Image: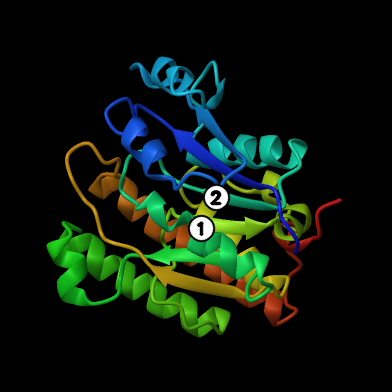
Amino acid sequence: MNKPKVIVVMPAYNAEKTVEKTFKDIPQGCADEVILVDDASKDNTVSIAERLGIKTVRHEVNKGYGANQKTCYELALKDGADIVVMVHPDYQYDSRLTPYMVGLIKDGVCDVIFGTRVRTRKETLEGGMPVYKYISNRALTFIENIVLGQNLSECHTGFRAYSRRVLETIPYGNNSDNFVFDTQFLVQAVAFGFRIGEIPVPTRYFKEASQINIRNSIIYGLATLWTIFRFFLFRLGIKKQKMFKRKT
């Protein structure tokens, strides 16, 4: 892929304290465009993004994390992206690593790249990940790897990069509008045979970084298991699943 058009997308919600730091950490020249989709924030996220010169689109009502990503990817594809990198604007992920993720796709090594926060237990916990989140992350990732036939160190990262072909193939428009969207996308990527790789990123948990509470974490975990079960049924040929029908 010669000189691919790279677009960074930011699904934002109440990120006024962190969006500028996240944006400024993206190395100059590695992205042709940055798009921020604001999911009806109640703070000054939009005005700050516009001041920084970021292309900004705002949902008039809060639609959810998955719905935000759907808008992000549709806008990126419409603008001619060859590679799309999703960076949460809450500074939980190190956007300085964007060119490394892009390079692995550009050079044809992978179709999907995840930024994994789980390199060692010590590093992850010292980075602030709550113990209950670490345990659930490891348990769910273990199950997902077995069922999906993968060997990923983390399946629940919000720092991801996709080739255009991935986004034009996977019917993500039918996915959940909520947090399980990421798990559904991963399962779909496996179902369609895309090559998935990962790079290590620092673990950052702090007050301003967005994170779901225990109740929503439990809901997310159950939804993840249900998604994996649906994949299992699909692979065995027991039941067809709309989520695995190629995008048209």
Residue 30: image tag: 2
User: What residue appears at the point 51 percent right and 23 percent down from the top-left corner?
Assistant: 53
Q: Tell me if residue 229 comes above or below residue 3 in the rendering.
A: below
Residue 72 against residue 108 in the figure, above or below: above
Few, some or many C-alpha atoms within 10 Å of disc 1 (few <14, some 14-19, many ≥20)? some
**Mark 2 vs mark 1, CA separation in Å:** 6 Å
Q: What element carries label 1?
A: helix
Percent from the top left, x then y, of residue 84? 62, 50
CB atoms at circles 2 and 1 under 8 Å apart?
yes
Q: Residue 214 carries which label?
A: none
49 versus 21 height, above or below: above
Q: Badge 2: how crowded within 10 Å, few (<14), some, or many (20+)?
A: some
Name the kind of residue labelled 2 in the image. Answer: Cys
Answer yes or no: is residue 177 visible.
no
- Residue 83 falls in which quadrant of the image? bottom right
Q: Is residue 63 left or right of residue 1?
A: left
Write down the residue under mark 1: 99
Left or right: residue 247 versus residue 126 is right
